[in-house]
Image (cartoon, rainbow, N blue to C red):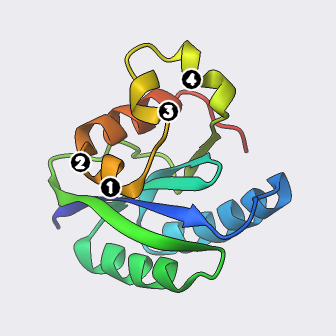
């Protein structure tokens, strides 16, 4: 069995409340556990950045469902490749919410996150993975 990593970004269609985010996480965790998918979701209004890990067929199925979700648009895959091991092996879906006010607290990433766009993120997949790794240390829900 080969493990793949897929990272995508999207833009929310409306402001997400904590209840909205909890609902997304509950549903994602259940589905991901059933499909042996692990990962991390970062929300930075109005962006989602999500890393998914698992068998390629499961990831492709998951992303097809994600693309149909009316809560966000402009789903852009920025990273998709096989990996030697999972970065998030114990999480059906880790989560963190990032506020713009936190920018000054992250050395080296401030310029990257000042005005994030899918195009900018797509051009920096290693920095996106670095960002997800940084935020995996603190889980909100």
Q: Are marks 1 and 2 in contact (CB under 8 Å)?
A: yes
Q: Are marks 4 and 3 in contact (CB under 8 Å)?
A: yes
State the separation of the CA atoms marked 4 and 3.
8 Å
State the separation of the CA atoms marked 4 and 2.
20 Å
In front: 40, or 43? 43
In the picture of the structure, the residue carrying the numbered disc 2 is: 123
Sooner in the amino-acid sequence: mark 1 or mark 3: 3
In the picture of the structure, the residue carrying the numbered disc 1 is: 119
Q: Are marks 1 and 4 in contact (CB under 8 Å)?
A: no
Task: Please state if 117 lies on the left or on the right of 86 as rendered.
Answer: right
State the separation of the CA atoms marked 1 and 3.
14 Å
Q: Which mark is residue 111?
A: none
Q: Which mark is residue 114?
A: 3
**Rendered position, 88 above or below 100:** below
| Front of the two marks 3 and 2 | 3
Residue drawn at (56%, 14%) of the image: 105
């Amino acid at each position: 069995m080969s493990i793949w990593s897929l990272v995508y970004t999207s833009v929310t269609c409306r402001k997400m409340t904590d209840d909205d985010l909890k609902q997304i996480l509950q549903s994602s965790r259940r589905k991901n556990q059933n499909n042996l998918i692990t990962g991390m979701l970062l929300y930075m209004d109005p962006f989602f950045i999500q890393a998914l890990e698992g068998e390629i067929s499961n990831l492709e199925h998951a992303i097809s469902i994600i693309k149909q979700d009316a809560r966000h648009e402009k789903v852009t895959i920025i990273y998709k490749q096989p990996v030697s091991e999972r970065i998030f092996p114990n999480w059906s879906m880790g989560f963190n919410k990032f506020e713009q006010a936190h920018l000054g607290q992250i050395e080296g990433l401030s310029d990257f996150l000042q005005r994030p766009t899918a195009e900018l993120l797509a051009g920096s997949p290693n920095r996106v993975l670095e960002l997800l790794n940084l935020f995996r240390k603190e889980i909100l829900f």
